[in-house]
């Protein structure tokens, strides 16, 4: 079943200090976030510049550090904050390694984009969230 989600603000997508959606429904929130990421990665205005940046990062340790400090780090922290909220609500395991969880959720999307190994679609984003949450939910 496909559900429509509102796109994130550009400030939230860039990690500009805004919190990610936290409606209390972790699955819906993560799907909205990943769908917004798919939309941005598929946007021709961002696709080629982001690919060029990723290429340069692999060759330039100083640029990689700057990217981590200014863009990736703050965005990663927003993602972890949303997952911490889910921990407090009992939606994911209390002892979940949040860095691993972020990698599990966003890694497949970014890998597919970087490798051009398949279509980036909202349905693919949803399937990542569903697969990850099946392993992230606490045992009852």
Image: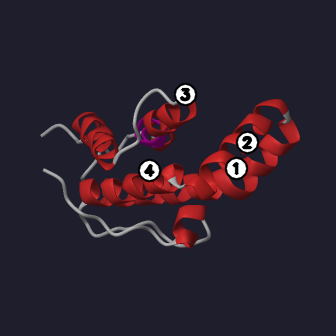
**Tag 1 residue:** 49
* Direction from residue 26 to residue 116 in the image, left or right: right
Residue furthest toward the front? 44
Q: Earlier in the sequence, mark 1 or mark 3?
A: 1
The kind of secondary structure the magenta stretch mainly shows is: helix
Asked if disc 1 and disc 2 are in contact, CB closer than 8 Å, the reply is yes
Considering the image in quadrants, where does the C terminus appear?
top left
Q: Residues within 10 Å of mark 3 (few under 14, many from 20)?
A: few
Callout 4: helix, strand or loop?
helix
Image coords of residue 70 (percent x, y): 73, 58
Image coords of residue 49 (percent x, y): 70, 50
**Tag 3 residue:** 115
Callout 1: helix, strand or loop?
helix
Give me the residue at 60% from left, 48% from top: 47
- Decide whether residue 51 is among the magenta residues: no
**Tag 4 residue:** 38
Q: Marks 4/2: CA distance?
A: 18 Å
Q: Which residues are magenta?
A: 101-106
Q: Earlier in the sequence, mark 3 or mark 4?
A: 4
- Decide whether residue 104 is among the magenta residues: yes
Callout 3: helix, strand or loop?
helix
Asked if disc 3 and disc 2 are in contact, CB closer than 8 Å, the reply is no
* Direction from residue 25 to residue 101 in the image, left or right: right
Q: Earlier in the sequence, mark 4 or mark 2?
A: 4
* Direction from residue 57 to residue 74 in the image, left or right: left
Q: Residues within 10 Å of mark 4 (few under 14, many from 20)?
A: many
Q: Is residue 116 above or below residue 81?
A: above
**Tag 2 residue:** 52
């Amino acid at each position: 079943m496909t559900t429509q989600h509102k796109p994130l603000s550009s400030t939230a997508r860039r990690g500009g200090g805004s919190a990610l959606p936290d409606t209390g429904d972790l699955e819906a929130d993560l799907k909205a976030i990943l769908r917004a990421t798919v939309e941005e990665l598929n946007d021709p205005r961002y696709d080629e510049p982001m690919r060029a940046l990723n290429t340069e990062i692999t060759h330039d340790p100083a640029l990689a550090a700057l990217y981590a400090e200014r863009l990736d780090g703050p965005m990663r922290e927003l993602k972890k904050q949303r997952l911490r909220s889910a921990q407090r609500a009992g939606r994911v395991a209390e002892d979940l390694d949040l860095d691993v969880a972020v990698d599990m959720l966003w890694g497949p999307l970014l890998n597919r984009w970087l490798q051009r190994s398949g279509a980036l679609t909202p349905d693919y984003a949803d399937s990542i969230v569903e697969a990850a949450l099946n392993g992230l939910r606490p045992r009852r």
